[in-house]
Image (cartoon, rainbow, N blue to C red):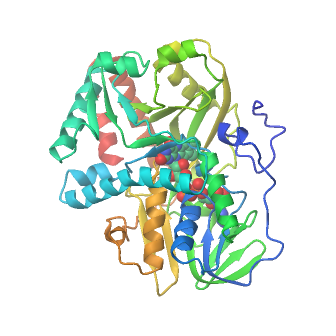
Amino acid sequence: MGRPDRMTLPRHHNGSLWFHSLEDLPEPQPPAALPERVDVAIVGGGFTGLWTAYYLNRHRPDLGIAVFEAETVGFGASGRNGGWCMGMADGIEERLHGPERDAGLALLHAMQETVDEIGRVCQAENIDCHFAKGGTLAVATTERHAEGFREYVAAKHALGFTDDDFTWLEPGESARRIGVRPNFGASYTSHCAAIHPARLVRGLGDTMRRKGIAICERTPVRAIAPGRVETSRGNVRADIVLRATEGYTDTIAGHRRRLAPVYTMMVATEPLSADTWSELGLARRETFADGRRITIYGQRTLDDRLAFGGRVGYRFGSGIRPRVEPDDPALADVEASMRALLPALGDARVTHRWGGVLGVPRHGRPFVTFDRAAGFGAAGGYTGEGVGASNLAARVLADLVLERVTPLVELAWVDDMPPRWPVEPVRWLGAKALMTLGRMADRKDLRGNGRSRVAGPLFERLF
Ligand SMILES: Cc1cc2nc3c(=O)[nH]c(=O)nc-3n(C[C@H](O)[C@H](O)[C@H](O)COP(=O)(O)OP(=O)(O)OC[C@H]3O[C@@H](n4cnc5c(N)ncnc54)[C@H](O)[C@@H]3O)c2cc1C
């Protein structure tokens, strides 16, 4: 596996460790000729688009489905992420502790089941995405974070969950499980799997091709109109059009300011020795984070690297770069956070550096919508938690399209549409202020001299 090099990467390479470690990354396959008409046109060849195609096909193999992808399958967030396949999603936590408690619980149970559903489909379809359900650790690096995590576990138990779902690990046990220093204990949930995201998304793409679904790569959709998609290669008539473009939604006419494209960055080390892993832990390939507000996330890969991400940023005017280059200054911060958190890494070499965009909805919750009269549907808004959530959202969307009466179509995500983001420069100024508050509060907490009393609560109210 070579080191990323900006001069030699082909245009369809997203720069991630995951794309580098695929056995094969063939040139994108644009269609020789566009289909004139399909039953369902899906815009976006990431997890949301492909899972939706998968479940539509599973229930109705007779449907003519085409997926339109601007570059190549998995080019976006699905082929670049941290590989946490979580039994949790953004917005659920808030619902659990308010008047929407039952709706929140239904979503949380559905998300927990989703991790096993993904594992089952991978087995059934022979997709080897290095799936390991080792759970996830949230490690406390301050007393204050430990207090918060203990309260988090107690609140879950008050809702009827047991230690099998959420448990508190005392500092000694936590330090044995993961070499984060300092280590004041951790909350642990078993409902998370580590995966190789590009192997999953590319495997899904291959599965769908085998099932006869048309995957039109290098075919960006410019506009969606009732009954048709307008692509760079011409128009295609479709009874139903489903949008699955997440952080890239602004690229489609009429769909601007729906989801803000926000960057998150990742680095990965060389494969580490058994001695290093005996200090770092993660024997079950648990994924991990800590208690800071500007989230960090990590996983031990099957080939014994540490893949680690963090830091977020928004570019003026919802700007999107196809790829983040390895010398981007934001990546140095991510590497520094990783080394500070895990001193046992020593001088291990970082071999891969990349980043990508998430889709952030203004109300902070994923959504699924389908308007039968308009023949239009969409799913997304997962922020940084879409690896598992995109599977659940796709099953909901498929059920809505096929008019299947299932518990999934009763979930609170249905038609919970976010308002549009404000126009610039308000959007950029707001994002900048929010990130500054989050970083200030994190710095104060991590210095260990008390809790941030202004920036922290303000960040939590606004985000
Ligand atoms: C660096 C990073 C780390 C992350 N880590 C995690 C994690 O560990 N766990 C987790 O749960 N989530 C994580 N996420 C978020 C998660 O990856 C996403 O929520 C999820 O992959 C979204 O899938 P999607 O199919 O909706 O969008 P995407 O995967 O972004 O797919 C959208 C696709 O649409 C294509 N496209 C764009 N414009 C057009 C157009 N006009 N016409 C046609 N096609 C178009 C794009 O090329 C892209 O392939 C991370 C994201 C990033 C960027």
Q: Quadrant of the N terminus?
A: top right
Residue 68 placement, left or right of 148:
right
Q: 253 or 392: nearer the eye? A: 392
Residue 13 placement, left or right of 295:
right
Q: 193 or 344: nearer the eye? A: 193
Give the quarter of the image for residue 454: top left
Residue under the image location 55 percent in, 12 percent down: 275
Confirm whether residue 263 shows in the render: no
Where is residue 199 shown, x and y percent of the image? 64, 47
Q: Is residue 275 above or below residue 43?
A: above
Q: Is residue 342 above or below residue 307?
A: above
Residue under the image location 50 percent in, 69 percent down: 378
Where is residue 54 shown, x and y percent of the image? 56, 66
Residue under the image location 35 percent in, 57 percent down: 110
Where is residue 96 shown, x and y percent of the image? 23, 52
Q: Is residue 62 above or below residue 250?
A: below
Residue under the image location 41 percent in, 59 percent down: 366
